[in-house]
Image (spheres, helix red, strand yellow):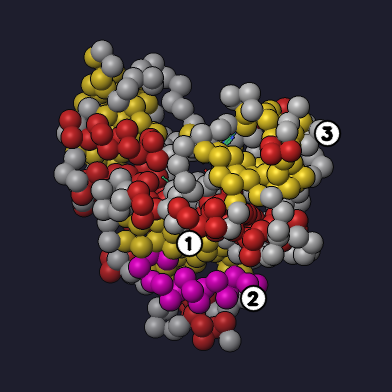
Amino acid sequence: MTSPSDHFDVLIVGSGHGGAQAAIALRQHGFEGRVGIVSAEPHLPYERPPLSKEYLAGERPFERLLIRPEGFWSERGIEHRPGLKVVAVDAAARRVECGDGSQFSYGELIWAAGGTPRRLGCAGAELAGVHYLRWRDNADRLRAQLPGARRIVVIGGGYIGLEAAAVLTKLGREVVLVEALDRVLARVAGEAISRFLEAEHRAHGVDIRTGATVASILGEGDCVRGVALSDGETIEADLAIVGIGIDPAVEPLRAAGAAGNNGVDVDANCRTSLPHVFAVGDCAAHENRFASGARVRLESVQNASDMANVAARTIVGHDAPYDAIPWFWSNQYDLKLQAVGLSAGHDETIVRGDPATRSFSVLYLKEGRVIALDCVNVVKDYVQGRKLILAGASYDKAALADPSVPLKDLAG
Ligand SMILES: Cc1cc2nc3c(=O)[nH]c(=O)nc-3n(C[C@H](O)[C@H](O)[C@H](O)COP(=O)(O)OP(=O)(O)OC[C@H]3O[C@@H](n4cnc5c(N)ncnc54)[C@H](O)[C@@H]3O)c2cc1C
């Protein structure tokens, strides 16, 4: 039995970007009921992207990662219960149970539990020198081991692996990056961006190995001594950092019967198939018009925040379906990458500007229409290009490719 003090009108599971924003938006929209956030992490809500950037580099202290100052939550009557992991959801009884046996009942539940880093499955993966970068505690553990590490192998050439490689190189470490596919960022960016970034990283001293798979992590006691590749080569290393994606953290919801096979499925208002249960952020698969209506699960701050706003507005009674244009950023060295739209399914790319200048954009077209842009150090293309995507029109390709023609002139 839960006591009245354990009942929340809205209970939010997860205090990342989605969970924190859901609570903020509820209050912004005048919601006066009792709002609670339970989260497995023992920290106040903080920004996750700096974990592979300024925080890893030691350039930004944790206090400056906080999404809101400590007093904000209690001033708004948002009850934050850190260090509690929800292990079961009873949707009929509108109740959740946590790992320590505590229970909370709710009027509406917002599931914003993000994801868990996908683990390496090979021998040696459990050594203490094998690291992941998802939560603050991961980054702290890695930072604590850095002083004793000279050579580091980064496994995975996605954004997190590339960002970590950039930071570690700047910190004077020798970095080898191992990517199984034939280019970095293969799942999210076009070849021009991949090749440009590979060249940048190599110029900064990162040894990039594409088409290379890890067979095992070699250790001595609990320490990492190297990474064995499937082709028989051994790369000497003191630490390994694994960035090979996440598994959406939805087990309790799935066990309760929520539909979905890649996270949980939500409708345009972020409702799951369970009554009174919403899901937002990295764990929520939704139909996205920027993916031609396909069901996608996006992993970005934009998506988590915008979905959280939709769930909060729905709860207060405003019908405001999710329709935000996806965007994302990544910082590596002095490069600012900004992506807008979704490039999956493109049938043509246009490179606008010369990559050798380290300032250019790649436009992705489908049936003649711009569906996405990746911009490297060109903020104005990113800002103006989103209008081209939203307009959904066809433009003169020579003009799209010509950096002297502002995209805003085309957008009209
Ligand atoms: C290192 C790194 C760098 C990134 N860089 C960028 C970037 O540059 N730009 C960008 O747009 N995006 C970036 N991202 C992605 C972005 O951070 C995520 O998309 C965003 O944090 C998703 O928000 P979320 O609320 O869905 O999940 P999360 O932020 O992951 O929050 C989920 C929270 O739920 C908690 N939780 C999980 N399970 C339970 C449970 N059962 N019970 C209670 N609590 C639970 C977790 O501990 C966590 O605190 C980065 C991510 C990482 C890890």
Q: Kindly indicate the quadrant of the structure image that contains residue 206.
A: top left
Measured in 3D between alpha carbons, the distance from the residue under mark 1 to the one under mark 2, in whole angstroms, is 17 Å
For label 3, the SS is loop
Residue holding disc 3: 92
Q: Mark 3 is on which residue type? A: Ala
Identify the disc placed on residue 339.
1
**Mark 1: few, some, or many residues within 10 Å (few <14, many ≥20)?**
many
Q: Which residues are magenta?
A: 375-393
> Which residue is at 63% across, 65% downward?
28
Residue holding disc 2: 391
Q: Mark 1 is on which residue type? A: Ala
> Does label 2 or label 3 sit earlier along the sequence?
3
Q: Is mark 2 within 8 Å of ligand 1?
A: no
> Does label 1 or label 3 sit earlier along the sequence?
3
Measured from the top left, where is residue 82 in percent x and y? Answer: 52, 38
Magenta part, dominant SS: helix
> Does label 1 or label 2 sit earlier along the sequence?
1
Image position of 341 (left or right of 133): right
Measured from the top left, where is residue 248 in percent x and y? Answer: 59, 37
For label 2, the SS is helix
Measured in 3D between alpha carbons, the distance from the residue under mark 2 to the one under mark 3, in whole angstroms, is 44 Å
Measured in 3D between alpha carbons, the distance from the residue under mark 1 to the one under mark 3, in whole angstroms, is 41 Å
